[in-house]
Image (cartoon, rainbow, N blue to C red):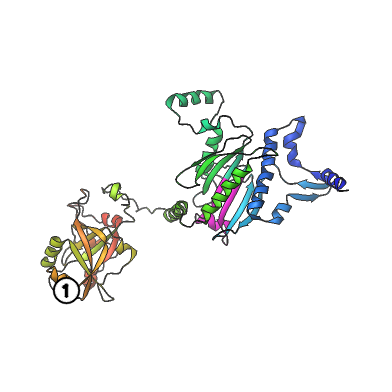
Amino acid sequence: MRTWLMFDLAAKLVWQGGEDVYQGGKKDVATLYEYWLFFKLLTLFQETFQLSPTDVEQLIEPTDDGLNLRLKQGKHYPIKGINNAGGRKLAIRFSYNRSFSGHKDYPDAGSWTMTMRPDYTLSFWPAGITEQEAEAQELIVHIHFDAKYKVDGLNEYVATLDEAVLMQEKNEQRKGLYKNADLLKMHAYKDAIRRTGGAYILYPGSEALTRQGFHEIIPGLGAFPVRPSKINDGTGALKAFILAVIDHFINRTSQREKLAYHTFDIFKEKPKADHALKDALPEAYGTNRDLLPDDSFVLIGYYKSAAQLAWIEQNHLYNFRTGNGPGALVLSKETVSARYLLLHTKGQQHSGQLWKIVGKGPRLFSKQDLLAKNYPDPSQDHYLVLQLAPVQDLELIHLQWNFKQLRHYVRGRAAAFPFTASLAELMRVVKQDV
């Protein structure tokens, strides 16, 4: 009875996708392998994630003359799910033949070049937000897989190519032989489809290969052997990879997580017309590697007398008032991380007194500490003191700045109060006739 029921059910099953494999008496094994891989991946992901039963059940739909298997090459079929292991709940989407539309402007989802359609895509983003929000905020990651029925010489794909090999490959390309075509397609997915964390070939071979773009499991490229076999079909290595990717997503301090945030932070707005800065500046290398004009800050401080300036120049120290009173230094991110100090005094229209801030940040000095260093007439009980050094960068020596043109400068009595500006802002008010 059970055998008859199985036979009867199979007899009622219509599979339009099967026409791609068997139409006209042909046996398209490559297409059949692509379909077979879908079910292998579906089984693997059902074991790993909580996939939506409704989405899985809708693979089979009733028709007037029986049942239809909806799977068809070129038709998008998505299955949603959840991963709730570890300290982070992730939304999952397993897609077959998802098209990523081309010519999309940032931050839209899709490809910024041409439309691309990987065979299978596994997408991850934080549960609780929509997929659209995750795309816009760089919180989603796509991993693509392409079925390749036959891949020869896998190791040749990643061998270091010298000039002779490149010339040979060029000649072979003219003849229509593309040894690197499959792996280059993975590079195309990785580069063109936004928020792609990896792209991998699935093929019925024996050699697994993974290459990491940096230090972590993704971003990466590679290939996994998955083959029909009763003993070892290769999905064990693929499952281990997926579990490692999940473990990576649970890690909130991963380098990829930081890169995703900085990508969002940098590109969330288009640069304004006046954003460009083409003045000569110290090169960002060595100890200056983090010298980004927009993110490097300058404190603008006041000195009240020639005696105070002489003390600053002799001791390489500068003091700010503390507390809540007028003129006290506000310990914001910009002030604490400032790398330069520009000094000015009463009656000046521009100043060239630029110092480099050194040491580990502001230190607390008492009035007695300053008197011990012969500071002229300290009036406060405590001060925040910065350690200074002369600026050595040739690009900044001998410049004068019209500091009163800075947006945070306040005229009147408040002109003596400290404030900050970015290095980019400061360079835009350089006195041109120096």
Q: Is residue 311 visible?
A: yes
Identify the secondary structure beneath mark 1.
Answer: helix
Would you say residue 413 sits in the magenta stretch? Answer: no
298 or 389: which is nearer to us?
389
Where residue 72 appears, as percent x and y from the top left, is: 70, 42
In the image as oriented, which residue stretches furthest toward the front? 231
For image coordinates 45% across by 31% down, the residue present is: 160
- Judged left or right of residue 415, residue 331 is right
Report the side of 124 relative to 397 (left or right): right
Looking at the rendering, which quadrant does residue 351 occupy? bottom left
Residue flagged by tag 1: what amino acid is it? Gln
- Which residue is painted at 74% across and 30% down in the image? 26
Image position of 103 (left or right of 259): right
Magenta stretch, residue numbers: 120-143
User: Residue at left 73%, top 31%?
Assistant: 27
Residue 83 figure quarter: bottom right
Residue 375, position in %: x, y?
Answer: 13, 69
User: Residue 268 vs residue 371: left or right?
Assistant: right
Q: Where is residue 76 in the image (x, y as percent from the top left)?
A: 66, 46
Residue 18: x %, y % from top left: 75, 39
Camera-side residue: 378 or 250? 250
Count of numbered tags: 1
Report which residue position mark 1 lands on. Answer: 368
Vertical order, 308 against 118 (above or below) = below
Mark 1: few/some/many CA within 10 Å (<14, 14-19, 20+): few
Q: Is residue 73 visible?
A: no
Residue 127 covered by magenta stretch:
yes
